Amino acid sequence: MTRRIALLRGINLGSRRRVEMAALRDVLAGLGYRDVRTFLQSGNVVFTSRASPGRLQRDLEKQLAAELGIDVQVLVRTRDELADVVERNPLGDVAHNPSRYLVSFLSAKLAAKLVRDLATVDVTPEQFVVSGREIYAWHPDGVQRSRLGKLLSEERLGVAATARNWNTVTKLLALADA
């Protein structure tokens, strides 16, 4: 059995797609997943399962629609994949405020040409690094003032994405290890 982390995209932001964490835990427990724990109200779930990440994603999206009436994308990482995200930390030497340091989790790796094209864009003082199925982004002036939002939008990237700040990423790993 492997510890997994499910990241639900765009829930509990404003008044739309509201999900109670107890209901979310019940959905996962109903699918037979074990040790289900949620973190914050933004769709972060740690649990144990033998199923592959792809199957988990499909099953969760289908069950959330059936039981809670929400159409939401789910991205799944293993505990080891999340540990690798934390270990890579390519902007750790400059990102000194964890609430302004985001990791965007992607549904697939970006096309090599897109990665090269993105690398030519100057967003100073912000910085970002594409690494595997993640994009690390440092927003020294805050996310609300960021110019990276449009640059790193799902429409431009061509893949599903959901972002978590560094505090959340490291706490999810700690929860997976608990």
Image: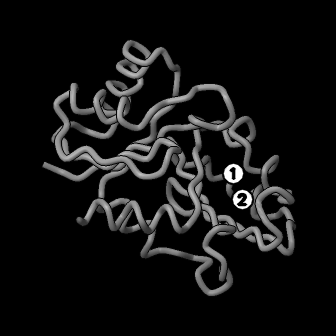
Locate residue 159, reporting x and y percent. Answer: 60, 38
The residue sitting at the bottom extreme is 93
* Quarter of the image that includes the C terminus: bottom left
Residue wearing tag 2: 116
Q: Is residue 41 above or below residue 3?
A: above
Report which quarter residue 9 is drawn in. Answer: top right
Crowd band around label 2 with a 10 angstrom C-alpha radius: few (<14), some (14–19), many (20+): few
Locate residue 140, reporting x and y percent. Answer: 78, 74
Q: Is residue 23 above or below residue 1?
A: above
Mark 2 and mark 1 residues within 8 Å of each other at the beta carbon: yes
Q: Say which of 10 and 78 sits in front.
A: 10
Q: Residue at x 21, y 25 (%)?
A: 30
Report which quarter residue 154 is drawn in. Answer: top right
Amino acid carrying mark 2 in the image: Arg
Locate residue 144, reporting x and y percent. Answer: 82, 56
- Report the colour scheme: one colour
Instruction: Determine which of the numbered discs, if any, sits on residue 21 in the image.
Output: none
Locate residue 134, reporting x and y percent. Answer: 54, 57
Crowd band around label 1 with a 10 angstrom C-alpha radius: few (<14), some (14–19), many (20+): few
Residue wearing tag 1: 113
Q: Residue at x 50, y 53 (%)?
A: 133
Amino acid carrying mark 1 in the image: Lys
Q: Residue at x 37, y 15 (%)?
A: 67
Distance Cα–Cα, label 2 vs label 1: 5 Å
